[in-house]
Image (cartoon, grey):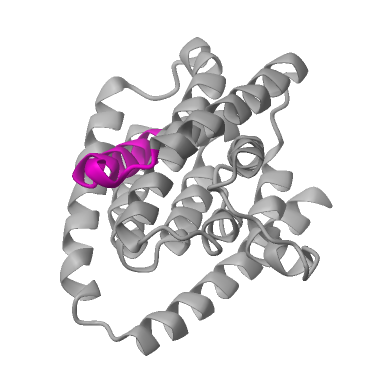
Amino acid sequence: MTSVFLYILLPSILVTSFISGIFGMAGGMIMMGVIAWFLPVHTAMVLHGFVQMISNGWRAILHRNHIQWRIIQFYVPGLLLALVVFMILGLVVNKALLFIFLGIMPFLQYLLPKNISLNIEKPKHAFSAGCVFTTLQLLCGVSGPIVDLYFVKTELNRHQIIATKAVTQGLGHIAKIFYFGAIVALNEELPAEVYFLAFLAAVTGTTLSSFVLHRMTDAQFRRWSHGLIIVIALVYLGRGIAEYFA
């Protein structure tokens, strides 16, 4: 396992953190899929959650003055409700379903009714966001484009959106670590230094991405981001279906 981490997973975390710093959701999806490709689901969830917790936590600290705590106070109860339900059910998806969920994630927004209007500034919507985001993160590790649907109709500026979104995602990954961490602790599949190296790789990849992001035009960003996400989704969907019927 150590050699797999050093030669495959560690470089993958570095590269996907770099991609995530440029394209956002795409990097997180790639990272989750690559880690899950080589590790058991519960171990992949914890390692991915750790890396994403560090990334979102650091982003929240950098933009701490813009965090909208009035949203977070309604978001957290929804998160806790979803976490408690999962703990009662003891639900852990198998690898086939994990990849299928990752594959359909980018297309969920197109399945929602056209007249739906979500706004995380509304208390009830913030509560539902806590439930939905956490459910998705505990099922497949990421909450994808659904997050944006809750923020697009708000009156928040981009700094407030970045800061508040970072808190919601960071808390979700903490919940994911808490939920799957006990299983990983019992199996002891990864040594502690693995998480430290993953942290360094994530920080390095995110830092390097900033140099590329500043040189990329909005048109290039939209074109590459959309295409990359669709390709990744189809690969994961194919992997999940193949493993499900294997």
Horizontal side of residue 156 vs 138, given as left or right: left
| Residue 50 on image: x %, y % | 37, 33
The vertical placement of 22 against 189, above or below, is below
Q: Residue at horizontal 59%, vertical 22%?
A: 80
Provide the residue span drawn in magenta.
50-68
The front one of 10 and 30 is: 30
Judging depth in this view, the residue of 142 and 145 nearest the camera is 145
**What is the quadrant of residue 161 in the picture?**
bottom left
Viewer-nearest residue: 81 or 91: 81
Residue at 75%, 62% in the rendered image: 116
Seen at 45% across and 75% down, the residue is 225
Residue 187 is covered by the magenta coloring: no
Residue 210 falls left or right of residue 160: left
**Where 65 falls versus 211 (above or below)?**
above
Location of residue 95 in the rendering, given as x and y in whole percent from the top left corner? 67, 42
Query: Residue 52 lies in magenta, yes or no?
Result: yes
